Structure formats: structure tokens, C-alpha cells
Amino acid sequence: MILRITFICAVKGLGLIPGVVGRFDSSNGLRVPHIGWNALQTTKDTEILDDVGGRHVYFVHSYRVMPSDANNEWISSICNYGDSFISSITRGNVHAVQFHPEKSGDVGISILKKFLDPSSSSKTKKSAIGKASRLAKRVIACLDVRANDKGDLVVTKGDQYDVREQSNEKEVRNLGKPVDLAGQYYKDGADEVSFLNITGFRDFPLGDLPMLQILRYTSENVFVPLTVGGGIRDFTDGNGRYYSSLEVASEYFRSGADKISIGSDAVYAAEEYLRTGVKTRKTSLEQISRVYGNQAVVVSIDPRRVYVRSPDDVEFKTIKVSSPGPSGEEYAWYQCTVNGGREVRPIGAFELAKAVEELGAGEILLNCIDCDGQGDGFDIDLIKLVSDAVMIPVIASSGAGAVEHFSEVFEKTNASAALAAGIFHRKEVPILSVKQHLLQNGIEVRVCAE
Ligand code: 1PR
């Protein structure tokens, strides 16, 4: 029998396995949920983990059980996040894991194969024990998806969110087929794949069945976490049928998504929350987070940089910028937008990030319209501002043009992951080169077939 270890606080439990379960302690700066890839240290000779020691597997959880003398004989591997915690237990033919083998790439597939067919284990050689690692920084491939003018769903890519060619025809840029590209990025070593249905704000996603099919087909062959965003909101169709945002998200989850990402609707929710101070529990963010857990809810922020002469010029959090604005301005704030950057809103990225964290977001995808598609590097000022403001993981996005941009963002900010689109689609920089560069710079990453 294989189980995912699921622990609930403040209950006695069945009393089968000795131990105390607790939440990761974020008071010392640890980001919770624990989302991402850590290497395991195996502590017992087991067939299903025989070559897993020292290799990275995917975790997503906020609670863990600590190793102790009382549960020592159960433990088959441990891992480290803040403290050492139990990542798997084994007794007889009972195996339970804290990580997600189904989302742990080739390592996870090999664990599942050996569980189903123990004879496939290579028990002739000694098991690798490995060393529990720090949480690896994630490299995420992002696919902006929309229908082109012929009605086919394609992967596209904008320049500061403008996805149309500069030619007279002004066609939607077509950079490939979503399922094929996602499969390629998985093979290339992407730690996650994100799909953003970029016209979801105007085209209702459940009317857009190809998007659900893309998720279904992708999840058949891609064994790392999949995120999908675009159009997650309440909706009433032409026949008066009402769909809640929870139904939209549930359909995405059923089709293979591990996380959903909310853009525009989270901005409205945060504005309302900051205005009233009341958590209504009715916003899409709060409802989806309550039902599926905050680790399943990403908020995607689409800010634009607005330069000002003094912090007193605006009511929002400003930063002293590293390069002055066009008229020599030394300060800037980051104004949030909705509907794919088409409409600006009276809220800053700093305020939005803090509000959505309180409302139940588990992660922030931090884009920057000014940097999108420019290849000049991530907006370090913005990413530092937001990743220092919240205790949930922040994904840096927009502007990657070279491997050095990835090491820069991890060295200068507290981002947990870096996402890129254009350089991967145009095959300018392979994911493997990004990972090798990060490793050479002492930054922990997962490398496939390590
Ligand atoms: O508002 O809940 O329907 O969500 C809409 C989602 O679609 C949001 O996540 C929003 O960011 C996204 N979106 C809307 N319009 C666009 C557009 O490009 N016209 N794409 C868009 C956002 C930004 C990144 C991009 C990075 C990296 N794309 O996802 O992939 O900037 O690009 P780069 O590496 O090439 O610089 P809702």
C-alpha cells in the first residue's frame, strides 16, 4: 500500500505511528507552504527508494512530522526545510510519502514503478543514501495561450503584453502548440509548467473547452506541477446559467491542474478587503483557497512601474529606484492592472501582495508589464519589494533574456522561483543551461537524471 501522508493538527490520530505533527514555523523567515523540490536522505534500505537518496522530489505542504526516537524505526527518508522532517516511512509493504511522486518527474515515476513492481528495483547495488538539501530554486516555463485569428489555441508571447506581430496583418504571434511545448519543457527539466489563458478575462474558460483538453493531454505526459490561470471568476452565460469561480477552478483541477492562478479577480478582492477590512469569505480567492488549500492558489500580479518624485506623491508603497525615471524621478510605485494589463487600478503591487496573502493566496506570480518580453532581466526592485513583504513564495516573472538574469534574481531577492517564456519559446536559452549556470553559482536547483 502507498499513501500520501496527510496529517491534521489537534487530533489524536489512529495512534499507529508515533509522532507529533506541527505547522512549519514561519516566524524565523521560512516561507510556508513549503512548495518545491528538495533532495532526500534515505535512512533505511527500501526497494522503492533504492536510488532516490540525494535526488530532488516535489513537496507542497504546510505541516510536517519531526523524526524522534519514538518513530525512528518507521522512517525511510528525511528532508530538510527549516528543520529536519520525515519525508517517507516504510514498514513491511506499507509505504507513505510526504512528497508527491506523481509530480516528481522521472524520480517519482521510478518510485511508483518500483512500488507496483518491486522486481524492477535494482537491488544488486547498494542504495544511494544522499544528503537532504536546501529547497531548490525553481525554473518555470510559462505558456501564454490564446486563440489566434483562425480560432486555433496557440502559445503566444507579448512585448509588454502586446501579442500581435508588428506587420501590417497584426496577427497573433504563434510560437507553437501548447501540449507539444509543455511536453518539451518537461523533458528539458522545467520544474513546473504554467498555462495562462490570456483572454480568459473576456472568454469564459468553461466555454473554452480546448483549454481543458490542453490540460488533460499535458497531464498525461508531464509529471511536474501544472498551473493554469485566466478567467477564474463568477460568470453567468447567455442562457442565464450561473457558474461560480469555484466551479471554474474545480474544472481546471479535474482536468489536471495542480494550482490555479487568479489575476483580475484577486485585484478586485484585495481592493474590497483593503477598503472594508472585512474578509467576506465569498471572493474566488477565499473560496478556492478554503476548499483546495492555499497551496493550490496562485495570485498573478500584472503591475506597471509609475515613477514619482517623492514617496509623498502617492498613497502606495514606493521604492527608491536603482535607475532614475525619464525625468530623473528617484522613486516609483508599481500600479496593478486587470484584464491583461488593459486597465489600471488604484492599488500597488506591494499592497496587493500583502492583501492576497491574508485572503488565502499560497503563492504569488509577479509579472512586470514594463519588462515583459524585453530580455533585459527581471525587475529586481519590484521582486525585492514584494518578496520581502510576504511570507508566501514569490515567482519572479518577466524580462529573462540570459542565464545571468536567473542568478541575479536569486542572489538579489527572496524569489523562490523564476519564470520565463520568450527565451524558451524562441530556443535562445535552454532550461538546462539556466540550471547549469545556477549550479555553477552555488544556487541549489533540481537537475534531471542527476
Ligand atoms: O485576469 O484572472 O483572467 O488572468 C489573466 C492571466 O493572463 C494573468 O495571469 C495575466 O498575467 C495573463 N495575461 C493577460 N494578458 C497577457 C498578455 O501577455 N497580453 N500574460 C497575459 C501575461 C506574462 C507572463 C509572461 C512573462 C514572461 N504574461 O506570464 O509569460 O512576462 O515573459 P518573458 O520571459 O518573455 O519576458 P485573469
Image: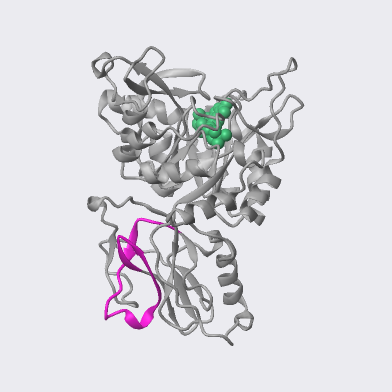
Viewer-proximal residue among 22 and 422? 422
Residue at 27%, 69% in the rendered image:
20
Q: Is residue 237 above or below residue 388?
A: above
Q: Is residue 137 above or below residue 109?
A: above
Extreme-right residue of the structure: 150
How is the rendered protein coloured? one colour
- Can residue 371 be spotted in the picture? yes
Instruction: Give the quadrant of the C terminus.
Output: bottom right
For residue 433, side relative to residue 338 (left or right): right
Residue 381: x percent and y percent?
Answer: 37, 32
Residue 281: x percent and y percent?
Answer: 34, 36
Viewer-proximal residue among 373 and 238? 373
Extreme-top residue of the structure: 327
Question: Is residue 62 a member of the stretch shown in magenta?
Answer: yes
Residue at 47%, 79% in the rendered image:
94
Dividing the picture into quadrants, the one containing residue 424 is top right
Q: Is residue 59 above or below residue 326?
A: below
Question: What span is colored magenta in the figure?
Answer: 59-85
For residue 381, side relative to residue 255 (left or right): left
Residue 185: x percent and y percent?
Answer: 63, 49
Viewer-proximal residue among 99 and 162? 162
Residue at 48%, 56% in the rendered image:
439
Question: Is residue 368 a member of the stretch shown in magenta?
Answer: no
Residue 244: x percent and y percent?
Answer: 49, 34
Query: Count of labels shown?
Result: 0
